[in-house]
């Protein structure tokens, strides 16, 4: 069990509040789940409130399952089951990311006890606002993956013959890169970013801000012994419109990252790399 | 469309020039400008100027005379100030429009500074325009009392601009003084916070610890500039216009006031320096 002393201040504070709530939560209580619903792309949104029974360890997903089993609102009106997206249910896939009580996070790891500890408390669920809604709490995160392609966030090993084994990675480098590699493309950093906003026009995706996740992945692969073969191409992509310069340094990304990835440090590292590349290009022409 | 393409083709250069112009010449100028203006207060410590009356007024006049003695002043103004400020402002507004503030949900300190950086930019543009239009271009219809600032009577006319006339602080004068107070405060914040973000943009500060350390340096600079800015505004808003005029007259005639002569003070033949 990770102790709070290992956490950065903002995460330690959140953990402390959650623990205090959990300590006073009573099993078997009834709480309200308020959901921002939407029947499909382009359809209007509406709020619906459900009453659920909370047991020890209940999380947002298990409450949504309870609602799905009996889709009746708190005022007794029959409705459709709430739709959501999920995969691993252990906070490593990112699919169930949504806005809970106004802040973005994964719903599978969100314990009701932490958020609604008393009888009659309300927990509010909204879909992420920076991606198009498919239905209810399910959003389409295609742009997030599109942006990873913009910065070539991969190790180039494809070919028609075996390239053999790659260079050795030092343990120090592995250790440094490990936390960056824990990114699960969930979208929290983008949801909280004031510079990343919903863009319905797909032709604008290549020139709108890539987001902290892509910048961090560019750094991860730039520091990989084989991945760094694409370093120049990644930096060129990040020097163009919608790249690193569109970051406004609000630094919300690092605050909401569920994996505590030092996203703002990655932004600094890439900032330095593009400065050096710009100077090199100015004097050497490439 | 063509302008969008131009912005995209030279995206990196324009972004970095935007950052650079904020530091130099604009940021450097702001520091010098505030130091000059605050001389209305710190000039009081200048004992050698006291023989001409109000030492703050005399020191400020000396500073203004020095600036007006610079060669090719209009060239310095246009290429060193007006064009860089216009460039920084226009691009800044264009860039700021791409963001959408979300402090209501993510009320983190850095997020507040992000939002305030943009607000201070917008307000700063309006303030600087008003400031330059009224004091440099002579748009006196925007000044309560209609005072035209004069480099020959720098302190007294500046006080009249802020006070709304030469009969003490009027209600309109309070509004102008408050606008100056808010305007300069926001601009000082914009510079201090801009220096903090520029260090990340250019890749000088990388680690959280380094950003925190540099943040403390920027905060200290901001506090220092804020004190200069506030002392300048308060200094002029509370200046006795008649006393200031007297001092300026004596500086122009190059004579010390008669009472001091009578008391055996050094004669006022010493040159006050600058552009006489």
Image (tube, helix red, strand yellow):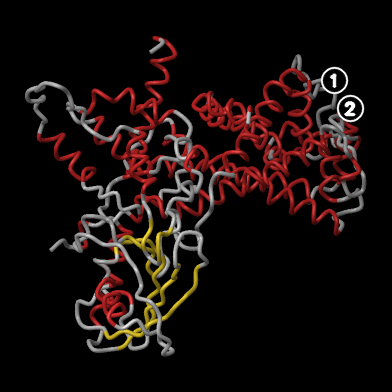
Give how far across and how far down residue A31 sits, in percent. 34, 84
Q: Residue at x 69, y 27 (%)?
A: B81
Would you identify the image quadrant in which residue A38 lies?
bottom left
Would you identify the image quadrant in which residue B86 lies?
top right
Q: Is residue A20 visible?
A: no
Would you identify the image quadrant in which residue A106 lies?
bottom left
Label 1 sits on a secondary structure element that is: loop
Total count of labels: 2
Give how far across and how far down residue B188 sits, in percent. 60, 43
Label 2 sits on a secondary structure element that is: helix
Q: Is residue A52 visible?
A: yes
Which badge, 2 or 1, comes first in the chain's sequence?
A: 2
Q: Which residue has dot 2 on it?
A: B252
Q: Which residue has dot 1 on it?
A: B276
Of B257 and A173, nearer the camera is A173
Label 1 marks a residue whose chain is: B
Q: Residue at x 50, y 54 (%)?
A: B112
Specify whether A90 is left or right of B165.
left
Of B162 and B263, nearer the camera is B162
Give how far across and how far down residue B143 sits, in percent. 87, 46
């Amino acid at each position: 069990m990770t102790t709070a002393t290992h956490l950065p201040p903002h995460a330690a504070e959140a953990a402390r509040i959650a623990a205090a709530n959990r300590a006073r939560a009573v099993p078997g209580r009834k709480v309200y789940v308020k959901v921002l619903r939407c029947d499909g792309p382009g359809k209007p949104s509406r709020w619906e409130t459900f009453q659920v029974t909370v047991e020890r360890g209940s999380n947002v997903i298990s409450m949504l399952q309870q609602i799905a089993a009996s889709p009746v609102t708190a005022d007794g009106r029959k409705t459709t089951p709430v739709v959501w997206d999920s995969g691993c249910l252990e906070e490593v896939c990112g699919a169930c990311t949504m806005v809970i009580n106004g802040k973005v996070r994964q719903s599978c790891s969100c314990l009701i006890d932490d958020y609604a500890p008393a009888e009659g408390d309300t927990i509010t669920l909204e879909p992420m606002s920076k991606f198009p809604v498919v239905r209810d709490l399910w959003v389409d995160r295609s742009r997030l993956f599109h942006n990873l392609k913009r910065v070539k966030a991969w190790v180039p090993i494809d070919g028609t013959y075996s390239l053999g084994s790659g260079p050795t990675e030092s343990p120090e480098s592995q250790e440094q890169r490990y936390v960056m590699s824990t990114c699960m493309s969930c979208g929290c950093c983008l949801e909280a970013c004031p510079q990343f906003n919903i863009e319905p026009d797909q032709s604008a995706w290549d020139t709108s801000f890539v987001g902290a996740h892509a910048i961090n992945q560019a750094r991860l692969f730039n520091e990989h012994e084989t991945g760094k073969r694409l370093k120049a191409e990644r930096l060129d992509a990040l020097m163009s419109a919608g790249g690193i310069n569109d970051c406004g340094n609000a630094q919300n990304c690092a605050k909401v990252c569920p994996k505590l990835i030092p996203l703002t440090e990655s932004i600094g590292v890439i900032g330095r790399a593009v400065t050096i590349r710009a100077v090199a290009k100015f004097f050497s022409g490439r | 469309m063509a302008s969008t393409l131009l912005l995209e083709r030279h995206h990196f250069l324009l972004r970095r020039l935007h950052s650079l112009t904020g530091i130099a010449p604009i940021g450097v100028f702001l520091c010098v400008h505030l130091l000059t203006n605050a001389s209305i207060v710190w000039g009081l410590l200048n004992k050698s100027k006291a023989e001409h009356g109000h030492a703050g007024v005399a020191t400020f006049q000396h500073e203004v005379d020095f600036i007006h003695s610079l060669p090719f002043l209009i060239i310095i103004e246009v290429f060193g100030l007006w064009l860089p400020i216009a460039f920084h402002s226009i691009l800044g507004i264009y860039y700021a429009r791409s963001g959408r503030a979300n402090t209501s949900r993510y009320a983190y300190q850095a997020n507040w500074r992000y939002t305030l950086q943009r607000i201070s930019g917008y307000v700063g543009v309006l303030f600087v325009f008003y400031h330059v239009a009224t004091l440099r271009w002579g748009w006196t219809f925007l000044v309560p009392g209609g005072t035209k600032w004069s480099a020959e009577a720098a302190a007294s006319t500046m006080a009249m601009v802020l006070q709304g006339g030469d009969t003490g602080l009027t209600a309109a004068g309070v509004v102008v003084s408050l606008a100056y107070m808010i305007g300069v405060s926001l601009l000082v914040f914009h510079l201090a916070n801009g220096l903090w973000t520029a260090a990340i943009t250019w890749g000088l500060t990388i680690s959280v610890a380094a950003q925190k350390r540099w943040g403390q340096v920027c905060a200290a600079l901001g506090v220092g500039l804020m004190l200069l800015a506030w002392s300048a505004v308060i200094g002029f808003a509370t200046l006795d216009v008649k006393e200031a005029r007297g001092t300026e007259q004596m500086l122009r005639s190059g004579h010390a006031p008669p009472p001091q002569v009578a008391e055996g003070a050094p004669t006022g033949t010493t040159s006050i320096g600058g552009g006489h």
